Every structure is written in C-alpha cells, then in structure tokens.
Amino acid sequence: MDAVIEVNNIKKRYKKRKTKDIIHAVNNISFTVKRGEILGLLGPNGAGKTTTIKMICGLLTPDEGSIIINGMNITDHRLKALHHISAVLEGNRNLYWRLTVKENLEYFAGNRGVSRKKAASLINDLLEKFKLKDKENELVNRLSRGMQQKLAIAISMLAESDVILLDEPTLGLDVETGYEVREILKSIVQDYNRTIIISSHDMDVIQDICERTVIINQGTIVTDDKIENLLKLFEIRSYTITLGNAISTKQKELLTQKFSHHIYTSDSYVTTLEIDLARSEHIYDLFNILKLEATPVESIDRKTIDFEQVFMKIIKGERSNAIAQPS
Ligand SMILES: Nc1ncnc2c1ncn2[C@@H]1O[C@H](COP(=O)(O)OP(=O)(O)OP(=O)(O)O)[C@@H](O)[C@H]1O
C-alpha cells in the first residue's frame, strides 16, 4: 500500500490548569492514509480530532507513538517530513488582512521557498481554480468568509505538499460557498494527486467528499471504514415493520428484552415497529415473538439511513459487532 501517512499508537495527555487532572485527549490512535485519498476524521466535541491533526502537522508532539510521513518519522526528520504537509487549521485567521488576495499568495509563496518565476504562474492557476481572479486586488478584510476560506486553502496548495490537513473547512459558510469548497477539495485530489485529511461536523460534507472515515470518540478510534460500508451495514440492519394489529403486553416485554433499539407505535390507523437488528439472523427471534399471538406482518421495509444517523449510532455505541475494528 502506498501510505503517505502512518499514525502508530499515538497518545497525547493534557493537564487541566486548575485541578491538575490528566485528560487523555488522544489515547492510542493508529490509522494510515493512502496517496490520493480524502479521509474524514469525525467525532463529537472534545473527541480528540484537533489534537490528532495538530500532532500530524507537527504543532504538538505525541507523548507516545509515531507519525510517519512519506516514510519519514516526524520525530527524527522533522523538517523534511513536515515539508510534505500543509494545514488549514483556523481558516482565515492565518491570512494577512491588510494585504490583497494576490499579495497574500505572493507572500506565502516566498515564505515557502517557491521561486519567483514559478510563483507567478502557480498563483495565476490557483486564482483561476479557486475563482478568485476577479478579487485578486481586493484587501482580505473586505472579502466574505467563504472567499477568505477559499484563499486559505489556495495558500495551502502553494507549497505543493503531498498532504493537506483541513480542520472544519466549511464551518460558517453559506450553502453555495460550502458546495464550491467541496468541489475544489475533490478536484485538488483528482487533478493534483494530493491527499487530504478533513475534520468536520458536517456529515453531508464528509459523505459527499470522503471515501473513508475514521471516527474518534473519547480519544480512541471506534470505526475505521469506507462510508459506503457503514451505510450499507446499518441500512441492512434497520427495518420498519408494519403489523396487522397491536401487540400484547407479553410481546412488548419480550421485544424490550431481546431488542434494545426499537420503536413501537400503534394508533387506530397503523401499527409499526422500527427495529435495529445487531445480526440479520435476529429477524427469526422477532418472528417468534410475533408468532406467539399470531400477529400478522403486512410489510417489511429496510429503513433508508443517512450518514448523520450512522454517525450517531456509532457514537452511541449502537454499532454491531460486524463493524471492522481498527487494527
Ligand atoms: N491545551 C489544552 N489543555 C487542556 N485540555 C485540552 C487542550 N486542548 C484540548 N484539550 C482537551 O482535550 C480533549 C480533546 O480536544 P480536541 O480539541 O482535540 O477535540 P476535538 O475533537 O477537536 O473537539 P471539537 O470538535 O470540539 O473541536 C478535550 O477534552 C479538550 O477539552
């Protein structure tokens, strides 16, 4: 496998200032990222995403474990390894607000050692690609948040590094600009063969642009899999069953004992049972409960499920044993 990044058993602890309590922000995380991949790093607030990203781009040093970039350990070959990484962490905060769009690009090109000759054509390409050409002479503090975010990502492209790390790149953007940023990120991977790690709370963005996701909760990985697989897995196990009549108290008790995640609704029009099965063969247990009172089954539908629901189920620990455990 052509791994650009290998994260091996990294740990990071913080000490709370007042109480001196230890927080295990990242607790033994391992994953790899292949060239040309867009990996989504997900997790609820405080899960450890930013700490992980900051360790990969060298802003924090892991307490334990190693990070290998293009075969180089960042502890042993810090400068060389970090040369392959660009990060957009707090978007517009890194820009020079009193310089124009073009001046910002020129400044950062010089800063990253791009020759003047090469910089001119590179900057022109980026202005075109990011649809910022007509704003090139505008001061950054006059730009919308979306334009500033696009400029921050364009700047991350100047160093021509293999990997781009993005923390919440669409946060606070309107729908149209958010969409434009997604398209730009996809094309960065396709046209420039870059690798992207993106952290976001926006599941639509993750579902749209990432093939694979690493989900972190309380400093550890709970899932590392293709988004497509996770959707399929949960869709297959989530059913909506319409029943011909209401079920008895005995049946309700058995359902609660057997299936921790189910919703039963019954009114004068319709009786339905929404149920998640940990294993597909558990459907037979359900049929046995229905058979007790000869409850007729009118229809069985697989529930359609979006990635946001999958994410919530995984975070709440409702994932089935069938989900691949991180190695
Ligand atoms: N400098 C710090 N000092 C002490 N604790 C910290 C520090 N930075 C982060 N933490 C704690 O470490 C844990 C992980 O934080 P981190 O910012 O990595 O999470 P996150 O997944 O990026 O969260 P969010 O989505 O809210 O940005 C949290 O409990 C956080 O409060």
Image (spheres, grey):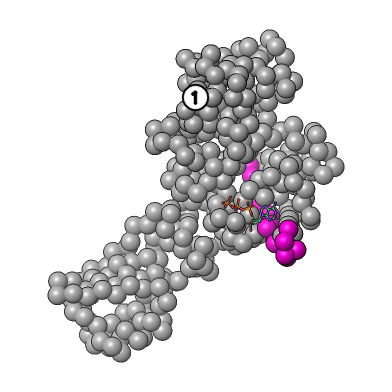
Within the image, what quadrant is residue 35 found in?
top right
Horizontal side of 323 relative to 106 (left or right) equals left
Horizontal side of 54 relative to 126 (left or right) equals right
Residue 314 point in image, percent of width and height:
50, 62
Is-magenta flag for residue 20?
Answer: yes
**Circle 1 sits in a helix, a strand or a loop, which is it?**
loop
Residue 92 visible at all: yes
Query: Measured along the vertical axis of the image, is residue 306 above or below residue 112?
Result: below
Residue 52 point in image, percent of width and height:
67, 49
Horizontal side of 173 relative to 273 (left or right) equals right
* Residue range (magenta): 17-35
* Residue named by callout 1: 143
- Look at 68% across and 58% down and name the residue there: 25
Tell me the kind of residue under disc 1. Answer: Leu
Determine whether the beta carbon of the residue marked 1 sits less than 8 angstroms from the nearest atom of ligand 1. no
Q: Residues within 10 Å of mark 1 (few under 14, many from 20)?
A: some
Query: Measured along the vertical axis of the image, is residue 261 above or below residue 188?
Result: below
- Look at 50% across and 66% down and name the residue there: 316
Dominant secondary structure of the residues highlighted in magenta in the image: strand
Q: 181 or 33, which is in the foreground?
A: 181
The extreme front residue here reads 18
Quadrant of image for the C terminus: bottom right
Q: Quadrant of ligand 1?
A: bottom right
Quadrant of image for the N terminus: top right
Q: 301 or 39, which is in the foreground?
A: 39
Horizontal side of 155 relative to 243 (left or right) equals right
- Look at 41% across and 36% down and name the residue there: 174
